[in-house]
């Protein structure tokens, strides 16, 4: 062991010893945080668990900002609602904190919001993939915007081309909680996305596009169109961050078998891989093309989920879902692609698989095991092959394969 490593080891050991002797706070995701969960800000960013243990550790007197952003959202201390939307506290010991704005001292889980905090989805001045708009999604706290992910949105067809996020090693750990409801906001204009995803609407649209009786062939008890998450809920450790993934701008129409099969397997495998990798990566999750299905005359028709106020078809069902994992420090990347249908035969699947499958050829991708369900199919591409077909992403400096 080098002299430098010995010194680092001794420093960390003494730091831990001081924390034990003089106090420090140790917080678990399962039981030590308030509910409704505030937004926790630490060192200028979102509070995060330790990437090795999944616990949260703070030194004695270290400051944590507790925020409840949104209209009529306030910090609650025990049973008392305050006038504060931002409430700084300092670590005392274990799960005990003391306020900096009042005499309050108590357990961290006794600090909560009077209602779930409100996240913000707003357009930026930046554009993407031509003339489309980049939206940023996060929390506006004390005049500062804390971004969780951004979305490239097509305001004509009402579809998200991709979302961009940072996936960190600690994302393997998540705070449990109930699944939030999706938020529509004003991004989709007069189109009601909650109505568009209803089974009766799916059948109505398929009947309109494919012909009478075809809707019952494609929408069944075991198959329908789901709200496919792009930036996954489980990619974000704390509950308030998870809540911000429940905006329809972070979804695309995804057939249920793929959503519960290959796509779920991919999301979990990437989190495990990044955890083992030990470094933050950038992930682009997106959609491409428009899914087609054969009509009553066996002619393939493009599928859209709904129509706008002028009866134009909008919210196309994508042909592909994909994730591009990019390490900007090592300039490595790889693309994972799922064909968004289980109704294609092998001949069509071969036509739609537009690259040589590097995962199938490379044992270093043993960390990924697809879970195909009833005809679904997924594959992997080198970045340079992927961008020959999918051209929506910003150009990345890629020199090698991420695995």
Image (cartoon, grey):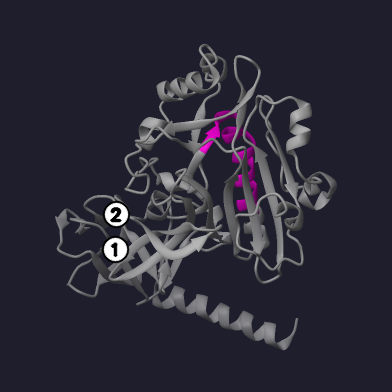
Relative image position of residue 157 (x, y in whole percent):
47, 43
Q: Secondary structure at mark 2?
A: loop
> Is residue 370 in the magenta section?
no
Disc number placed over residue 34 in the picture, else none: none
The residues bearing labels 2 and 1 have C-alpha atoms spaced at a distance of 8 Å
Indicate whether 235 appears above or below 229: below
Q: Are marks 2 and 1 in contact (CB under 8 Å)?
A: yes
Q: Residue at x 40, y 52 (%)?
A: 244
Residue at 75 percent across and 58 percent down: it is 384
Let me know if residue 53 appears in the view. Answer: no
Chief SS of the magenta region: helix
Residue behind mark 1: 67
Could you tell me which secondary element the residue under label 1 belongs to?
strand
Which residue in the structure is indicated by mark 2?
117
Residue in view at x 78 percent, y 34 percent = 350
Drawn side of residue 206 relative to residue 387, left or right: left
398 vs 10: above or below: above
Q: Quadrant of the N terminus?
A: bottom right
Q: Is residue 181 left or right of residue 86?
A: right
Given residues 226 and 49, the one toward you in this image is: 226
Task: Give the quarter of the image for residue 396.
Answer: bottom right
Left or right for 15, reference 272: left
Please identify the quarter of the rendering in which residue 142 is found: bottom left
Residue 352 drawn above or below residue 46: above
User: Could you tell which of marks 2 and 1 lies nearer the N-terminus?
Assistant: 1
Crowdedness near tag 1: few (<14), some (14–19) or many (≥20) residues, C-alpha within 10 Å: many
Magenta segment: 253-272
């Amino acid at each position: 062991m080098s002299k430098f490593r010995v010194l680092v080891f001794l420093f960390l050991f003494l730091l831990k010893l001081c924390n034990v002797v003089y106090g420090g706070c140790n917080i678990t995701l399962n039981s030590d945080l308030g509910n409704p969960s505030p937004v926790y800000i630490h060192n200028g960013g979102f509070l995060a668990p330790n990437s090795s243990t999944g616990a949260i550790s703070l030194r004695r007197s270290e400051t944590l900002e507790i925020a409840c952003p949104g209209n009529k959202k306030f910090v609650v201390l025990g049973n008392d609602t305050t006038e504060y939307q931002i409430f700084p506290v300092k670590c005392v010991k274990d799960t005990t904190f003391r306020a900096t704005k009042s005499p309050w001292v108590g357990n961290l889980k006794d600090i909560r919001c009077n209602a779930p905090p409100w996240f913000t989805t707003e357009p930026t001045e930046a554009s993407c993939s031509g003339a489309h708009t980049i939206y940023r999604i996060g929390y506006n706290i004390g005049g500062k915007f804390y971004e969780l992910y951004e979305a490239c949105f097509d305001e004509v067809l009402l579809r998200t081309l991709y979302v961009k996020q940072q996936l960190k090693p600690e994302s393997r750990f998540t705070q449990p909680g109930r699944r939030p409801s999706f938020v529509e906001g004003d991004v989709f204009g007069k189109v009601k996305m909650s109505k568009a995803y209803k089974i009766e609407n799916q059948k109505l649209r398929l009947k309109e596009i494919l012909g009478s009786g075809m809707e019952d062939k494609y929408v069944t008890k075991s198959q329908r169109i789901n709200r496919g998450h792009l930036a996954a809920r489980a990619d974000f450790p704390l509950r308030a961050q998870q809540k911000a993934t429940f905006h329809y701008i972070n979804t695309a129409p995804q057939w249920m078998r793929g959503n519960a099969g290959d796509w779920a397997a991919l999301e979990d495998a990437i989190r495990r891989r990044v955890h083992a990798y030990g470094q933050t990566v950038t992930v682009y999750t997106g959609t491409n093309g428009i899914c087609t299905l054969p009509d009553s005359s066996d002619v393939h028709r493009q599928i859209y989920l709904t129509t706008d106020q002028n009866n134009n078809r909008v919210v196309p069902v994508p042909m592909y879902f994909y994730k591009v994992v990019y390490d900007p420090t090592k300039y490595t990347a790889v693309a994972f692609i799922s064909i968004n249908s289980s109704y294609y035969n092998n001949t069509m699947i071969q036509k739609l698989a537009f690259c040589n499958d590097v995962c199938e050829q490379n044992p270093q991708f043993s960390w990924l095991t697809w879970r195909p369900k009833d005809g679904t199919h997924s594959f992997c591409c080198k970045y340079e092959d992927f961008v020959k077909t999918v051209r929506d992403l910003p150009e990345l400096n890629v020199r090698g394969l991420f695995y």
